[in-house]
Image (spheres, helix red, strand yellow):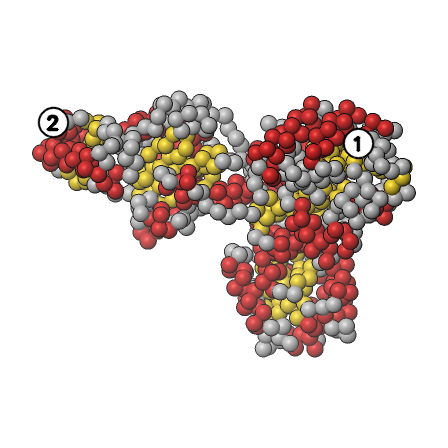
Amino acid sequence: MRYDFNELSQLLEPRSVAIIGASADPTRIGGRPIATMLKAGYGGRILPVNPNRDEIQGLTCYSDIEALPEAPEAAIVAVPARAAVDVVDALGRQGCKMVTMFTAGFAELGREGRGEQDRLTGIARQYGMRLLGPNTLGCWNVDIGYFGSFTSSLDLGFPLAGNIGMASQSGAFGTHLAAVARRRGIGVPILVTTGNEADITVADAIGWMAQSDRIDVICAYQEGFSDPDRMLAALNAARGADKPVFILKSGRSEVGGRAATSHTASMTGDDAVANEVLRAHGAIRVCDTEQMLDFAYVARKRIYPVENSLGVVTVSGGAGIVASDEAEQQELPMPPMPEDAQAELRALLPFCAPVNPVDCTAQALNDLSLFQKFTHAALVKGGYASVICFATTVAGSATIAPRFLEALAPLRKEFPDRLIVICAVAPPDIVKRYEDAGFLVFEDPCRATRALAAMGRVGKALTMTAPVRQAVPKIPLPPTTPDEFQAKALLSAAGIQVSAERLVHDSERASDAAQEIGFPVVMKIVSPDILHKSDIGGVMLNIGSSEEAASAYNKLIAAAQKHRPDARISGVLVARQITGGVECFMGISRDPSFGAMAAFGLGGIFVELLHDIALRQCPFDEAAAREMILSIRGAPILTGARGRAPVDLDALARSLSCLSVFAAGAGARLVSVDLNPVLALPEGEGAVALDAVIELEEAEP
C-alpha cells in the first residue's frame, strides 16, 4: 500500500490556525499556543474562538466556528471532551482539513472513551480531515514560528534551528527530549507528538520528515504500533532518502499467555520481534535519551561510513584503553597503524605508543604540532573513517584551546568525509568554537565511541535493500489444530522435507510399517492434544526389529492413556530414524503487530538454553533465509568449524524460506509452528524436519 505523507504539511505549515477554547491567559492550555506563536512571529493568521470574549491577547476573537471569516487550514481544539465531538463536526463543515486535539478523556480511559474516540475519527474521515491526538501536546515548526502546542518546556526557550526532526507518541516525554536537546545545543525545529493516535501516528510524522528538505535526521519515541504497515512504509521512505531514524521503543516485556504452547513465541517475545523488524527496515534502536541525542548529534554531519573503523589519538593511555574496550563491545574495528607509519611516529616521539590507540603522551601538549602530526597520520596512513582525539581538560583550557584548534583545523578541511571527535572537558563557548570548525565534541570517550559506531550501522542500514513483501498463495488449513502426522503433510506440501513415516493404528501394522521403512525406526504417539510428546514418554528411539516395533506400539498407547486419558489419540507414527548432521530449530510465531515471524536456531535442548535465535518477518526468499541462518552465534557449527563437515545450507535455507511462505499464506489463524529438530545433513544430503507442531485458532481472529 502507498501512503501520502505529504498531507502533514497542513499540520506543520498552516497558513491559518483556529484555536477553539482560546484563552486570554497565556499560561492556560488554550492560551499558551497563541502567546507562543505571537512571541515567535508566526506569519499566518491566528483565529481565537471563545463565546465569552471579543478579543484575546490582542487578537479578534470569534464567538463560534461558524463566525470565523475563513476556513482555517488547521485548528487546535482545547475544550472539554463532552464538547469535542461537536467541535470537530463544526470544523469539518467549515472546511478545516487538519485538527490538533489537546482534549483528553478518550481511548486512554477505556471502552467508553474508545467509543467516543471512534466517533471522533469517523467524523473527521467523513470530511476528509486529519486528526492529531486526542490527548496530545501538539506539534511545532520553528522555521515558520508555528507552535501548536501547550507544553511548558517552551518556557525554557524556543527550540534551536537545525536539521533534526522528532516524533513522539508521548507528548510529555517528546517535549522533554526536545528540551534536553536544546540544553545540549542540538536543534529540533520539527516536533510532532501523537497522543492516542486516533488518526495521525508517529509513522506519519517520520514519513513527512523523510520527504522534507529541511530534515536530515529523524528521532522517534514509540510505545506501540497502531499501524505497522504505515510504520514500515515510513521507515522505507526515510531509508530511501538517506535519512537515519533513531527509535527509542519502550516496552521490553515478553509474550505472556499466548506463548503457553509455543516454544517459538516464548523465546522470541514482543521486544525481540520489534527489534528485528525495525532493524530490517533501517531504523537504529536506541536505549535511552542520552544515546538518542548522542547519535543524532553526530548524524547531523551526514557522514555514515559503511566500512567504519576507529583510530584513537590520545594523551592518556587509560583513555585509549577505555575507548578500545567500548569499540570491541560495539564491534567497531580498531586496526593497528601500518608498520611504516608506526616507525615514522616513533621517529617523531621515541617513547610514544603508535599502534592504535596512538598514545602521543602529554609531550604532544607541549608541542601541539605533534598532536596534529599524529592525528594526520591516523587519518592518512591509518585510513580510519572515525577518529577520537582525547585531549581532556587541556583542549578546554582558555589559553591552550585556541592553539589546539589552530593545529587541528586544517585536518577538518582536508578530510571532510571523516568523523573527528575532540574528547575534552571545556566550557560551552570553547565547545562551540570546536563545533563551528566542524569537529564533534564529547566529554566521555565511551559515549563518543558508541556514537561513532552507530554511524557505521547507519551506513550499512542505508545501503541495505528494503525487504520485499512478495505475494504468497493462500494456504488452506484444517478446521482444528492438526496432529503431528497432519502437520507434516501440510508442511511437506509447502516444500519442507520431512522424514519417511507411516501412521498406524495397531501393533501388527506398526511391525509391518517398521519393516517397510527400514530399521532402525523411531515411534511416537500422535495426538492433537499432546504437543510435547517426550514429556509423557510418548517417543521411543532405536527400534531395531518387528517385534520391538509391535511392543513399542503398545507401550506408547499405554503411556498416553496413563498420562493423558482425556487426549484424542490419532495413532502411532513410525518413522525412519535419521542420524548424523546437526539438529536445528525452525519456528513461527504470530506477533500482534507484525504478523508471522520466523525464528531459527540450533535445535534440541540448545535452542532454549542458549537463546541464540535469529528472527525475520515472513515471507522471505532463500537468500534472506541463508543470511538469517548464518547470523546466529552458533553458525560455525553449521559451516564446518573444527573440522566438522559443513551441513547442506542450501537445503536448510530452502526449508526456512518455504516455512516463511507457508506462514504468510496461512493467515491469521496460524498461531505458531515448531519444527524441532530439523536435521541439517551434510552438504548435498538435505535438511529433514523430524518433528512438527502446528497450532491454529479455530476461528478467524
Where does the image place residue 63, in percent across and percent down from the top left? 85, 32
Q: Is residue 50 above or below residue 335?
A: above
Q: Is residue 110 above or below residue 354?
A: above
Query: What SS does tag 1 mark?
Result: loop
Where does the image place residue 13, in percent across and percent down from the top left? 78, 37
Residue at image coords 64%, 68%: 390
Seen in the image, is 506 located left or right of residue 530? left
Please, what is the three-letter code of the amino acid marked with disc 1?
A: Glu
Residue at image coords 68%, 72%: 393
Where does the image place residue 471, in percent across and percent down from the top left? 50, 25
Which class describes the residues within 10 Å of circle 2: few (<14), some (14-19), or many (20+)? some
Please, what is the three-letter code of the amino acid marked with disc 2?
A: Glu
Q: Which residue is mark 2?
A: 508
Residue 495, by quadrant, is: top left
Q: From the viewer's perspective, is the residue at label 2 or at label 1 nearer?
A: 1
Residue at image coords 75%, 30%: 87
Q: Is residue 493 above or below residue 113?
A: above
Asked whether residue 519 appears in the rendered view, the answer is no
Q: Is residue 169 above or below residue 571?
A: below
Q: Earlier in the sequence, mark 2 or mark 1?
A: 1
Residue 18, by quadrant, is: top right
Closer to the camera, 185 or 49? 49
Query: What SS does tag 2 mark?
Result: helix
Tell me the quadrant of the picture where the N terminus can be found: top right
Asked whether residue 587 appears in the rendered view, the answer is yes
Q: Which residue is mark 1?
A: 73
